[in-house]
Amino acid sequence: FEVSSKALKESGSLRKVIKARLNVVVAMSHVDSEANLIPHYFDVHQAALAAKEFSVASTCLLNISREYQIMGGLKASLKYCSQALEIAENNFGSLHFYLILAHRAHLLCELKRFPEAQTDFECALASPFPEVKAALEMIKPLLANHIASHLPNSRNTHPPRTRDLLPTWAERMSLAKNESVSFS
């Protein structure tokens, strides 16, 4: 991605350079899961905003949010997730938009702010994407324990289809199982 970034820059494809830079940071996260990549994501976010690459800008903020969530900084995570959602509204209805809604619903559950989590959950129900539906199946039991009377089909909670879970959601499921939290 670094090589392609240089070639794209030379060819004048500056918006694609920003996407390649994001891919560099994401690749770094897979190489070293303990690395603090927040400053790198923020740099790409700033460049993406300047270039009006809103999907990249919001992806960076979502990744920053997830980094804070993993560290236990739930309020910081919520701050960046909400900023990501605001930017992602430029791509309303996209997979990315709905994944941010699901992520924020999960964060709000962790913060025990269940009525707000339910709102994001319900908005994400409109998603046609199986990846989002699988993430929502993970969130549903967290909500069902607190606001069952208002949750659609709260009695019909099914475990998420793991083949549809994106890696970040599969990681959450694994962590939850290790913490003895049931998602079924």
Image: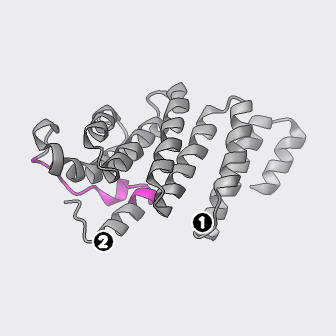
| 126 versus 181 height, above or below | above
Q: Is residue 23 visible?
A: no
In this picture, residue 146 sits left or right of residue 73: left
Q: Name the residue: 51% across, 30% down.
A: 86
Mark 1 belongs to which amino acid? His
Q: Name the residue: 36% across, 53% down.
A: 164
Q: Position of residue 31 (x, y in %)?
A: 63, 69
Real-space CA distance between mark 2 and mark 1, rounded to the nearest whole angstrom: 23 Å
**Residue on which disc 2 sits:** 179
Mark 2 vs mark 1: in front: 2
Circle number at residue 30: 1
Tag 1: Cα neighbours inside 10 Å, few (<14), some, or many (≥20)?
few
Q: Name the residue: 73% across, 42% down.
A: 18
In this picture, residue 145 sits left or right of residue 163: left
Residue sitting nearer the eye, 65 or 161:
65
| 179 versus 138 height, above or below | below
> Toward which corner of the image does residue 114 lie, by quadrant?
top left
Q: Position of residue 182 (x, y in %)?
A: 22, 64
Magenta stretch: give its range: 155-170
Q: Position of residue 57 (x, y in %)?
A: 63, 38
Circle number at residue 51: none
Say which quadrant the C terminus sits in: bottom left
Q: Secondary structure at mark 2?
A: loop
Q: Name the residue: 33% across, 36% down.
A: 120
> Toward which corner of the image does residue 123 lie, by quadrant?
top left
Residue 177 painted magenta: no
Mark 2 belongs to which amino acid? Glu
Q: Secondary structure at mark 1?
A: helix
Of the two numbered discs 2 and 1 on the same chain, state the one appearing first in sequence.
1
| 42 versus 31 height, above or below | above
Q: Position of residue 180 (x, y in %)?
A: 25, 71
Residue 168 painted magenta: yes
